[in-house]
Amino acid sequence: MGHGGDAIAELTTDHQEVEELFGKIEALPSGHEQRKKYADQAVIELVRHSVAEEAYLYPAVREFLPDGDSIADKEIEDHAEAERTMKKLEAVDADAPEFDRIVGELMTEIRSHVRDEENDLFPRLRSAASEDQLMKLGDKVRQAKKTAPTRPHPSAPDTPPANKLLAPGAGMVDRIRDALAGRGKD
């Protein structure tokens, strides 16, 4: 969390870190308890990342790209779908029969979303926005990730201004729950 650079570099680094966690999950045998810990860590990072994108990246996409509204709407729907999957994953242990199916579903959703962003959205945004605008956006993204929730909240608002107002409170509650449960420590 908090890598530096412009928004695109920040978010791309997040993508790489989540992919590393997915690789660790895939490298372990089915039912291995460490798979749940890696899945929890991936969910924490994905939720923080999504909240930051919804609060700052997608409003910038709407502003800078001529078809930004439709792109942002599609990205937000991708997030909503992944968040519902993450909520299902939160409720199962690594040795549960449905764990492999749900974690596989999440990986597929996220990998598709990442491909769309890195191959289409990010290059278009880099062409449309100045480096200064992208640097300022990177600072906002990093700030949002610091206070963002760490657990999926599928029914929470996903567009400004409501998401910007509610995310820090949900984030604080999530971090307290995580500390008490030892979640995300490995």
Image (cartoon, rainbow, N blue to C red):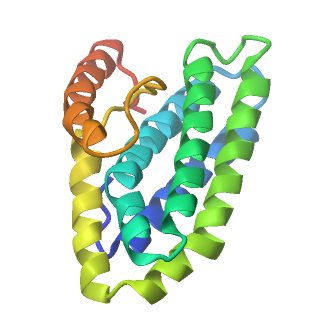
In depth, the one of 172 and 24 nearer the eye is 172
Displayed quadrant of residue 136: bottom left
Coordinates of residue 15 in the picture (x, y in percent): 53, 58
Q: Is residue 16 visible?
A: no
In depth, the one of 131 and 124 nearer the eye is 124
| Residue at 64% from the left image edge and 48% from the top image edge | 110
The count of marks equals: 0
Coordinates of residue 13 in the picture (x, y in percent): 46, 64
Displayed quadrant of residue 172: top left
Q: Is residue 94 left or right of residue 39?
A: right
| Residue at 48% from the left image edge and 43% from the top image edge | 46
Displayed quadrant of residue 102: top right
Q: Is residue 144 visible?
A: yes
Coordinates of residue 22 in the picture (x, y in percent): 65, 45
Q: Is residue 172 above or below residue 60?
A: above
Q: Is residue 3 left or right of residue 151?
A: left
| Residue at 46% from the left image edge and 27% from the top image edge | 152
Q: Is residue 152 left or right of residue 161?
A: right
- Where's the C terminus, which quadrant? top left
Q: Is residue 118 above or below residue 179?
A: below
In depth, the one of 69 and 139 nearer the eye is 69
In depth, the one of 168 and 23 nearer the eye is 168
Q: Is residue 97 above or below residue 74?
A: above
| Residue at 69% from the left image edge and 44% from the top image edge | 109
Coordinates of residue 181 in the picture (x, y in percent): 35, 13
